[in-house]
Amino acid sequence: MSRALHLAEQLISRRSVTPEDGGCQEILAARLKPLGFACETIASGPDNFRVTNLWAKRPGTSGRTLVFAGHTDVVPTGPLEQWSSDPFTPSHRDGLLFGRGAADMKTSIAAFTVAAEEFLAANKEPALGIAFLITSDEEGPSVDGTLVVCEKLKQRGERLDYCIVGEPTSVEKLGDMIKNGRRGSLSAKLTVKGVQGHIAYPQLASNPIHLALPALGELARTEWDMGNEFFPATSWQMSNIHGGTGATNVIPGSVVIDFNFRYSSECTAEGLQKRVHDVLDRHELDYEIAWVVGGLPFLTKPGELVGAIQQAIRATTGVETELSTTGGTSDGRFISRICPQVIEFGPLNASIHKIDEHVRVADIEPLKDIYRRTIEALDKLR
């Protein structure tokens, strides 16, 4: 059995439903300390939602550092009776490794750990520093995990040059896609106010649902931007509308609308907020709105890191990689604030968060080799 596969199985066997780490980070620290990594545990959050973070760093001679970022927490299993095997007992069937977290993202963590071991075994005094930023709060609120560690590193003046986030990005075959950026996420809860009254006497009331509809229609039709060569156009979508008292003869006093922007680097959160307020004000609505910036957009253009991992994928698998910024958010949105080059790369993502989550066993060694070759390429840069 390969060392990467064995470590992946060890991690999968730990029950680490967010925010629990299940001892995964202890396993990693025990392997990294003998390699010269200084390992620090950074705990955060209230007692009923305690998050464990591991920051491990081994400096190089050049002052440059490559960070691998990952999360040991996993989403809940869902109905256990629907799993073909225990989600926390690594199982093999038809060339696949099954278990919660197999794809998202314990296999990536295992592969990068062994890649670092192999690289350091062959390079006793490398130019490139290597670090691990591992959290147990990626699948949860994400407020006591990578965000907290990045703020601490910024306060210390830590220099980070490159980051690989081990998200499962491959689609059809290993290496066919990496994420070199992500869209921003901006959410809002809009409350439009009216006057409650009897539905038979509308002249004595003011229906907030009727009042809100023209403005909502305009927002839905608005072209926010055209996107660019890396990002699709910004989208605005409503997710929930709540109005009414439950009675069929009452005009409600308010209606609440939840909506979200997934926005490109052509927009800013502040600019989008202003444009929404302009629409609502033009329609003369009486409203309140609460905004939440879920993540800022980030982009790593083709350069040292993208080139290194593209070449590593090509050398290992023969696959030409597609750059993409699609999908949701990741912890890359926090790391990009203190690191200029951030990409995401990992195994196939088809089974993530699903019953019988799995990875292809045949992909584990190539994944490890891609990570190792990327480290080697960045180490050679001067």
Image (spheres, rainbow, N blue to C red):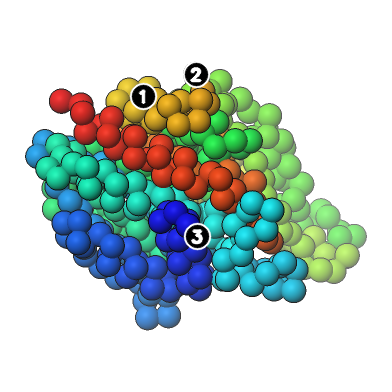
Measured Cα–Cα span from mark 1 to mark 3: 29 Å
Quadrant the C terminus occupies: top left
Task: Name the spot of residue 80 as percent of width and height, x first.
Answer: 69, 73
**173 left or right of 29 in image:** right
Tell me the crowding category of disc 1: few under 14, some 14 to 19, or many 20 or more residues within 10 angstroms, Cα based: some
Decide which of tag 2 and tag 1 comes sooner along the chain.
2
Would you name the residue on which mark 2 appears? 229
- x and y percentages locating residue 216 in the rendered image: 68, 40
Residue 336 visible somewhere in the drawing: no
Tell which tag, 1 or 3, sits nearer the viewer: 1
Quadrant hosting residue 45: bottom left
What amino acid type is highlighted by mark number 1? Gly
Instruction: Specify the quadrant of the image occupied by residue 32.
Output: bottom left
User: For residue 307, which numbered disc appears in the image?
Assistant: 1
Marks 3 and 1: in contact by CB < 8 Å?
Answer: no
Q: Looking at the picture, how far across and down is residue 31, in whole percent?
A: 28, 62
Q: In the displayed image of the protein, which residue is found farthest to the front?
A: 1
Residue 136 appears anywhere in the view: yes
The image shows residue 99, relative to residue 58, as above or below, that is: below
Residue 58 vertical position relative to residue 263 in the rendered view, above or below: below
List the residue tagged with mark 3: 139
Identify the residue at image location x=47%, y=35%: 179
**Contact (Cβ within 8 Å) of mark 2 with mark 1:** no
Residue at the spot 18% in from the left edge and 41% down from the top edge? 123
